[in-house]
């Protein structure tokens, strides 16, 4: 197995009281590598993935680092393991986040004992899907499915106080077994308000505030503000734009033209005759992405909230639910308008317009996770322009 830290012959690993055979490498980074593994002696057991955090060879000690400099790779490996383990344990159980089965130590690593995560094995990544799209973009069905699944994952982890901080096509994988997309790689994640990593996100998917923070850190300066969950939404906007266009946009989003007028570039991409997509209306996706990058801190002033509205049996009960939801939503800012569609599309959801993006963001964070009339609430942002055109996107959540 070329490049494998465990040598050429596939070794046997002991994890969770079972023996696992390493079958193939799946990928590697600066401080970790991932391998496909199979449980020995139980052909019915599903395969898994082992993420091994490998310290590099050589001494761990060295000259003192200047403030803001990157820590040694050996420290990165151990710290990355502890960070990702803690995040996955706290986020365990959500269908759109990779499942952590357990942790163990590999005593046969070439550079000494290494820490490992045993994870569920997922299938193709969005990055690979883009390669297969032949620069024509993914189907609107696939984009819709990905947007919904990732938004649900982000709503959950943001409600838990986490920022993923490295959202990109390689970190969004498809689960054929559960027929959904899942987020992986929480090595850069942090609790909002307690950011312990300065170099976050990947080039091409990095929000402006993260870019500024990275530049200051490289210069040995301390940023006065920390990044928030908004950086994940920025990255998601770029991912969806790449899925629609079929193009890598790293150089585009790093250009001065993008920084000056990203909205015009997005319009050109959606107007391109070379973009092949289904007949499903695409303007709602365009507006979602544009509003994300225009306001930076949210995808729009409209919230879509999964609620108990669909269970109303009569007009009087409907009005009671409407008033109860209005009263709850007004706790986070003035409500400009509120709509609960009685028929599809949109039935079972609530559209709430706030006066400004700040109130909308606060409401999204506080409402997600609440229980309303026995139902779990999930809130996300919805483009105002799409709503004004009368398009209520039934499957956003």
Image (cartoon, helix red, strand yellow):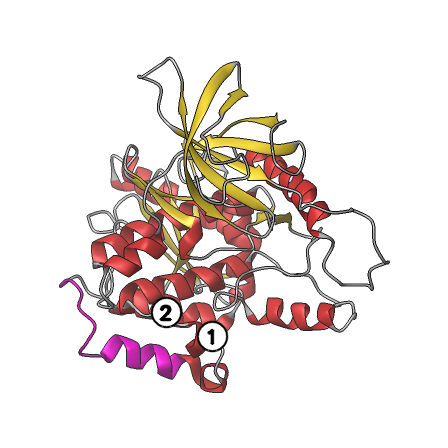
Q: Residue at x 49, y 67 (%)?
A: 355
Residue 370 seen from this side: yes
- Left or right: 45 in relation to 105: left
- Spot occupied by residue 2 in the image (x, y as percentages of width and height): 45, 44
Whether residue 137 is situated above or below residue 370 in the rendered picture: below
- Element carrying mark 2: loop
Residue 132 found in image quarter: bottom left
Give the Cα separation between the discs numbered 1 and 2. Answer: 21 Å
Span shown in magenta: 263-279
The mark that comes first in sequence, 1 or 2, is 2
Q: Foreground: 344 or 286?
A: 286
Residue 373 visible to an observer of this rendering: no
Q: Indicate whether residue 275 is drawn in magenta.
A: yes
Whether residue 175 sits left or right of residue 231 in the image: it is: left
Discs 1, 2 touching: Cβ within 8 Å: no
Query: Mark 1: few, some, or many residues within 10 Å (few <14, many ≥20)?
Result: some
What residue did someone put label 1 on?
294
Disc number lying in front (1 or 2): 2
**Residue positioned 52% across, 37% down in the render:** 51
As drawn, the label of residue 248 is 2
Image: 306 above or below 338: above
- Mark 2 Cα within 10 Å, few/some/many (few <14, many 20+)? some
Q: Name the quadrant containing residue 386.
A: bottom left
| Residue at 75% in and 67% down | 224
Q: Quadrant of residue 80?
A: top right
Q: Residue at x 45, y 39 (%)?
A: 97
Q: In front here: 325 or 223?
A: 223
Instruction: Say if 55 sits above or below 356 in the image.
Output: above
Q: Secondary structure at mark 1?
A: helix
> Residue 64 placed where, x, y %?
86, 58
Give the side of residue 305 with respect to residue 195, left or right: left
């Amino acid at each position: 197995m070329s490049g494998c830290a465990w040598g050429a012959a596939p070794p046997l690993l002991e994890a969770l009281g079972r023996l696992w055979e390493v079958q193939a490498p799946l990928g590697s980074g600066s401080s970790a590598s991932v391998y496909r593994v199979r449980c020995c002696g139980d052909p019915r057991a599903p395969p898994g993935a082992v993420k091994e955090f490998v310290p590099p060879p050589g001494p761990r000690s060295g000259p003192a680092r200047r403030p803001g400099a990157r820590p040694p790779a050996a420290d990165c490996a151990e710290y990355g393991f502890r960070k990702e383990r803690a995040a996955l344990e706290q986020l365990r159980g959500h269908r759109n986040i990779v499942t952590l089965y357990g942790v163990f130590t590999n005593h046969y690593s070439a550079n000494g004992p290494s820490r490992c995560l045993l994870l569920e094995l997922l299938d193709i990544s969005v990055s690979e899907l883009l390669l297969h799209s032949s620069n024509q973009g993914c189907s609107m069905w696939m984009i819709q499915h990905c947007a919904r699944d990732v938004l649900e994952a982000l709503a959950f982890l943001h409600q838990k106080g986490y920022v993923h901080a490295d959202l990109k096509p390689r970190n969004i994988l498809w689960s054929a077994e559960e027929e959904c997309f899942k987020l992986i790689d929480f090595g850069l994640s942090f609790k909002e308000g307690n950011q312990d990593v300065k170099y976050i996100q990947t080039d091409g998917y990095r929000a402006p505030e993260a870019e500024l923070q990275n530049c200051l850190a490289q210069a040995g300066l301390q940023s006065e503000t920390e990044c928030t969950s908004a950086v994940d939404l920025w990255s998601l906007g770029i991912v969806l734009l790449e899925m629609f266009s079929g193009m890598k946009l790293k150089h585009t989003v790093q250009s001065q033209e993008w920084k000056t007028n990203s909205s015009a570039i997005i319009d050109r991409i959606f107007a391109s005759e070379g973009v092949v997509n289904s007949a499903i209306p695409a303007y709602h996706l365009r507006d979602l992405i544009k509003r994300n990058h225009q306001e930076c801190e949210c995808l729009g002033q409209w919230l879509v909230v999964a609620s108990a509205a669909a269970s109303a049996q009569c007009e009087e009960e409907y009005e009671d639910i409407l008033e109860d939801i209005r009263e709850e939503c007004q706790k986070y800012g003035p409500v400009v308008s509120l709509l609960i569609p009685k028929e599809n599309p949109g039935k079972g959801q609530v559209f709430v317009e706030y006066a400004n993006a700040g109130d909308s963001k606060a409401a999204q964070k506080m409402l997600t996770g609440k229980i309303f009339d026995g139902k779990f609430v999930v809130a996300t942002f919805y483009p105002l322009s799409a709503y004004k055109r009368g398009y209520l996107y039934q499957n956003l959540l």
